[in-house]
Image: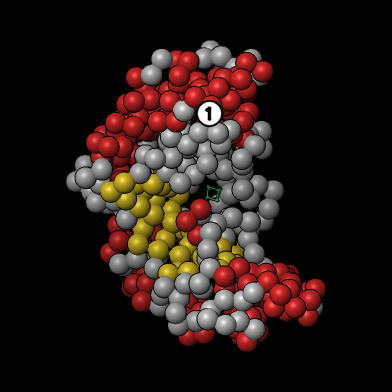
């Protein structure tokens, strides 16, 4: 799968995305884009082609980071570099090395403890190569505490357990998987390229290898017709996996994704925020006998504070969603708009008079009412994608 036409080193590379929890991490690009690239809800790599970067290029990227970190450390004291010294180093850095210098400086400023391997499915490379990359990284930077990556269930389900164990022993600590749904109907409808059973098999293998597992779930992905099935089947898959983390990332439908065509043709009816809240409530109440940490750390989510450890925080999370569902439509609208405009973060802020006045004034200006709020919200949230 290596791109034979592009074997010449093209310089230090950074891919387009990382999970929100990896904001402090050094990004090392192992592959370019997504080998699947067909999920109808995903805008990230559309129009790009996939390639595996040659092993020696990845090793070179890591060596370049080491070189820049050594420079930065020479100009730093007590693990910190002041602005003047950083600026001096920047001015001495050749233009062709400014990307790697910037990545190294950002990592240094964040303590150099975590690394994220890009792009969408690093586990697709040869296990022996991944072991070599991890070993090299950890030998140059022995203080790294965490190395993480995205991976597809389909890929992990096909890797031998021995290889996965070797990857874990070499220092891959956490895998982020886009489970999205446990419903085969939903997975098939959005062309996820994975079935419930492969999600479960992959998740259980990661757990068996002792790596941490983070599973992404996408509220709203079943649309109105499959909402209940999506909630129940997803909870059932998660219950069989017992991941370390469950991360919510609600569906948004910008014009750049294939799912938008289905919406326009009337083949996919998106859920309203209230329907998604009901779906999340059903899903969380169906989590059973697992010890995962639930997090909602994405700007697209309506409930930022629906997070906590299962099972002890289950009722606290459910009460937040129930509170929203119990509100009159106008109050729900004010929170929906306030949250998506970044004016409000929590339901308790509905009692904050200046904030609610600000949101009400915007609703008046934009003619947003409880009847049209979901269409307006869709416009607002696509700006964040
Ligand atoms: S596998 Fe992940 S990155 Fe690839 S198209 Fe699907 S959601 Fe997007």
Q: Nearer the viewer, residue 96 or 185?
A: 96
Residue pictured at 40% horizontal, 78% vertical: 170
> Would residue 8 be seen by someone viewing this image from the given angle?
no
Whether residue 219 sits left or right of residue 228 in the image: it is right
Q: Determine the residue located farthest toward the left in the rendered image.
A: 289
Q: Is residue 99 above or below residue 239?
A: below
Q: Is residue 124 above or below residue 85?
A: above
Residue 38 placement (x, y as % from top left): 57, 45
Which corner quadrant of the image does residue 213 belong to? bottom left
Question: Could you classify mark 1 by the number of other residues whose Cα lies within 10 Å: few (under 14), some (14-19), or many (20 or more)?
Answer: some
Look at the image and name its color scheme: secondary structure
Residue pictured at 63% horizontal, 60% vertical: 15
Residue pictured at 43% horizontal, 40% vertical: 304
Q: In the rendered image, which quarter contains the C terminus?
A: top right
Q: Is residue 112 above or below residue 284?
A: below
Whether residue 97 sits left or right of residue 306 in the image: it is right
Residue 100 placement (x, y as % from top left): 68, 73
Residue for badge 1: 355
């Amino acid at each position: 799968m290596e791109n034979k036409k592009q074997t010449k080193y093209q310089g230090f590379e950074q891919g387009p995305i990382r999970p929100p929890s990896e904001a402090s991490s050094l990004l090392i690009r192992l592959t370019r884009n997504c080998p699947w690239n067909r999920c109808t809800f995903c805008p990230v790599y559309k129009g790009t082609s996939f390639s595996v970067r040659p092993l020696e290029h990845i090793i070179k990227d890591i060596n370049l980071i080491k070189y820049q970190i050594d420079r930065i450390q020479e100009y730093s004291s007590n693990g910190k570099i002041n602005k003047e010294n950083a600026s001096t180093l920047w001015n001495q850095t050749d233009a062709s090395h400014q990307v790697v210098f910037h990545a190294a400086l950002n990592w240094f400023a964040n303590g150099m403890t975590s690394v994220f391997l890009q792009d969408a499915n690093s586990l697709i490379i040869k296990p022996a190569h991944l072991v070599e990359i991890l070993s090299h990284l950890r030998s140059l930077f022995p203080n790294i505490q965490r190395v993480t990556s995205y991976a597809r269930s389909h890929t992990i389900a096909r890797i031998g357990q021995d290889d996965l164990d070797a990857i874990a022993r070499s220092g891959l600590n956490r895998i982020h998987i886009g489970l999205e749904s446990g419903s085969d109907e939903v997975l098939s409808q959005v062309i996820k390229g994975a079935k419930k059973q492969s999600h479960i098999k992959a998740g259980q293998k990661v757990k068996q290898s002792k790596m941490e597992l983070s599973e992404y779930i996408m509220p709203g992905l079943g649309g109105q017709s499959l909402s209940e099935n999506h909630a129940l089947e997803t909870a059932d898959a998660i219950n069989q996996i017992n991941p370390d983390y469950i991360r919510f990332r609600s569906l948004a439908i910008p014009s750049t994704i294939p799912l938008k065509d289905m919406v326009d043709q009337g083949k996919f009816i998106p859920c309203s925020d209230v329907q998604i809240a009901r779906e999340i409530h059903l899903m969380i109440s169906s989590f059973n006998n697992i010890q995962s940490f639930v997090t909602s750390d994405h700007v697209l989510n309506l409930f930022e504070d629906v997070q906590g450890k299962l099972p002890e925080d289950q009722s606290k999370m459910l009460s937040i969603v129930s509170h929203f569902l119990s509100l009159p439509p106008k109050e729900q609208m004010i929170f929906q708009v306030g949250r998506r405009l970044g004016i409000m973060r929590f339901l308790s802020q509905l009692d904050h008079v200046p904030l609610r006045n600000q949101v009400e004034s915007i609703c008046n200006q934009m003619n947003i009412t409880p009847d049209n709020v979901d269409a307006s919200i869709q416009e607002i949230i696509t700006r964040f994608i």
